[in-house]
Image: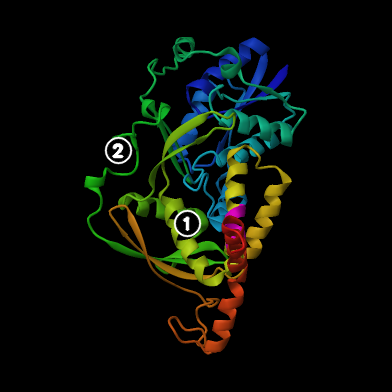
Amino acid sequence: MKKIVLAYSGGLDTSFCIPYLTDKYNAEIYTVTVDCAGLSEQDKNDLESQALKLGAKSHTTIDGTQLLYDQVLSYLIKGNVLRDRTYPLSVGSERFIQAKLAAEFASAIGADAIAHGSTSAGNDQIRFDTALKTLNPDLEIITPIRDEQFTRAYQTEFLKKYDVHFSSKKSPYSINSGLWGTTVGGHETLTSEKPLPFEAFPHLPEPENLNDTPEVVSFSFEEGLPTAVNGISMTPLTLLKHLENLGIAHGIGRGMHTGDTIIGIKGRIGFEAPVATLLYTAHSELEKIVLTKWQRHLKNMLSDHYGMMLHEAQYFDPVMRDIEAFFDQSQKHVTGTIDLHLYHGSIFPQGASSPFSLMKSKKALYGEQSQLWSGEEAKAFSKIYGLSSVLSNQLANKQEYGNS
């Protein structure tokens, strides 16, 4: 009998896939949930119970949170990576870890195929397909919702036979949440004119309901990664959860992003990214005092490229490992502390310190004094430094007005 592994979320589409694939392929369906959000034990039990009720041969939950941090989120932090310098890739970054662990599970049980519930509309279908083909090219990929264009009404009616009930009406807002943030889609995001209403964002309070007490928070980093908040050391996953609660309380990280989808059309999404917003602000301020001008310049360019490649489903391209190696090397001295003032959705960096600070030299003083060079040397440098612009403009003036 054919063995099919189904990447299972517990939502309508993947729930429908269990009995549908069982019937169509006369197959055994092995559901697997790769947890990249930190599910509760109750959530895990509910997923398993529903999968088995719908006819799955077995259900397995795999914890992908630590792998997500180690292989993806840590590099987003080291690189301050954004898509289009706006969007911190809140949920899409999880798909590569989910595909990786699902493909490994499929190989371990000797599956013939792997299925996912993506539709034909979004970026995730391409991320899953590209990752699965890269990691296990011998596995057949089955996508019934995309291929058959099943409607929500058809799926909900079909599942009633199994005493599993979903609403036939689509929610006005689609919500996807993970460790790195939340995305929000709705009818307002189908065009560029209107904003999402504040009440559409599931976690961040509306501006008038924000915490009215300012707070100064100290962040500690070691070699580019956060290790403590207000002097209290935490494991990475505990720290991320702590910052999520902190950011939500102060209304940090709400945004809208308009950009290009993988297939080339325009797309728009709302997002909540309190963790990424706090960490990027603190981390980049610390980098300013420890990295050289040219390190920061090159790193910014590579960060843009890394974010584009991640968004475009190219996480497993070798160039990503090359960029990560640069990120690792660039972070050797990004160790220290930075204080941020948080209030009503705003972040104000108050100051940073590091044993590797390039501002610690007693000879290079801020202002008009320096013991590293004389006034005559500065004058000569200024003259030579500007020669390229002076000469090019002189030549341009001669060409425009003649040699008179």
Q: Nearer the viewer, residue 144 or 366?
A: 366
Horizontal relation, residue 212 to residue 100: left or right: left
Place of residue 387 in the rendered image (x, y in percent of width and height, measured from the top left):
61, 71
Q: Residues within 10 Å of mark 1 (few under 14, many from 20)?
A: some
Whether the residues at callouts 2 and 1 have beta carbons within 8 Å, the answer is no
In the picture of the structure, the residue carrying the numbered disc 1 is 280
Write down the region rendered in magenta.
Answer: 297-302
Q: Is residue 58 above or below residue 228?
A: above
Q: Which residue is located at x 51 percent, y 59 percent? A: 235
Q: Which residue is located at x 42 percent, y 56 percent? A: 278
Give the CA separation, mark 2 to mark 1. 23 Å
Q: Which residue is located at x 40 percent, y 15 percent? A: 168
Place of residue 184 in the rendered image (x, y in percent of width and height, measured from the top left):
41, 34
Q: Does the stretch in magenta take in 256?
A: no
Q: Is residue 317 above or below residue 369?
A: above
Place of residue 215 in the rendered image (x, y in percent of width and height, measured from the top left):
30, 62
Q: Is residue 307 above or below residue 111?
A: below
What secondary structure is marked by label 1?
helix
Counting residues from the N terminus, which is met first, the one under dot 2 or under dot 1? Answer: 2
What secondary structure is marked by label 2?
helix
Q: Quadrant of the C terminus?
A: bottom right
| Magenta stretch secondary structure, dominant | helix
Q: Nearer the viewer, residue 131 or 369?
A: 369
Q: Does the stretch in magenta take in 298?
A: yes
Q: Nearer the viewer, residue 307 or 374?
A: 374
Q: Which mark is residue 198?
A: 2
